[in-house]
Image (tube, rainbow, N blue to C red):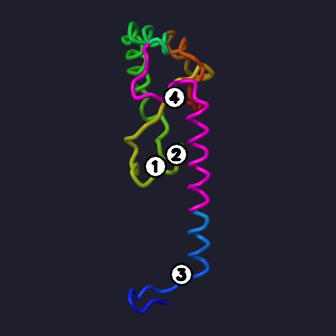
Amino acid sequence: MSLETHEREMTLSERARDAVVDAGQLLMSGFEWWLLRSSEIPTTPFLDRGDFPWADTLEKHWHDVRAELDAILDRREDLPNLQDILRDVAPISRDDRWKTFFFSPTATARTPTAPVARTPPRCWTPSPAW
């Protein structure tokens, strides 16, 4: 123990925790590096509109997408709360106001609008059944 800084020596548990945190940060750093290198989308600050040919269809049919959203929101109470799907957000989402809906071509109870269904599969997120 240093008399000048009055710091105590870390316990074995504290040192182990720090080692695990450091290892986790190294793993995440490696994963992020791999993810950036394997992305099909450029990692430049500005993206070329030509890389997303399906975006024009979505923009042209935004009214259809909005109409579907309005229909979904008519059943808002049936939508899952975000914290029920992602436990990590529970501290910031403790009420029933932050709802979640995932557009998915594999959803059985809901079929997304045609413009959304024509977006590439990598843009989809698994949809909970509702």
Residue at 42%, 31% (x, y): give it. Answer: 76
What's the distance in space between the residues labelled 2 and 3, CA to CA?
34 Å
* Residue 12 horizontal/vertical position (percent): 61, 80
Of labels 4 and 1, earlier in sequence is: 1
Q: Which residue position holds label 4?
A: 102
* Residue 112 horizontal/vertical position (percent): 52, 17
Label 1 element class: helix
Q: Which residue position holds label 2?
A: 86
Rendering quarter of residue 60: top left
Q: Which residue position holds label 3?
A: 10
Which residue type carries mark 4? Phe
Find the magenta span and give its range. Answer: 22-49
Residue with the most extreme bottom position? 3
Which residue type carries mark 3? Met
Mark 4 or 3, which is nearer the eye?
3
| Circles 1, 2 touching at the beta carbon (< 8 Å) | yes
Which residue type carries mark 2? Leu
Residue at 56%, 25% (x, y): give it. Answer: 124
Label 3 element class: loop
Label 4 element class: loop
Q: Which residue position holds label 1?
A: 89
What's the distance in space between the residues labelled 4 and 3, CA to CA?
46 Å
Residue at 58%, 49% (x, y): give it. Answer: 28
What's the distance in space between the residues labelled 4 and 1, CA to CA?
17 Å
Q: In this view, does 97 lie to the left or right of 1?
A: left
* Residue 55 horizontal/vertical position (percent): 44, 13
Of labels 4 and 3, earlier in sequence is: 3
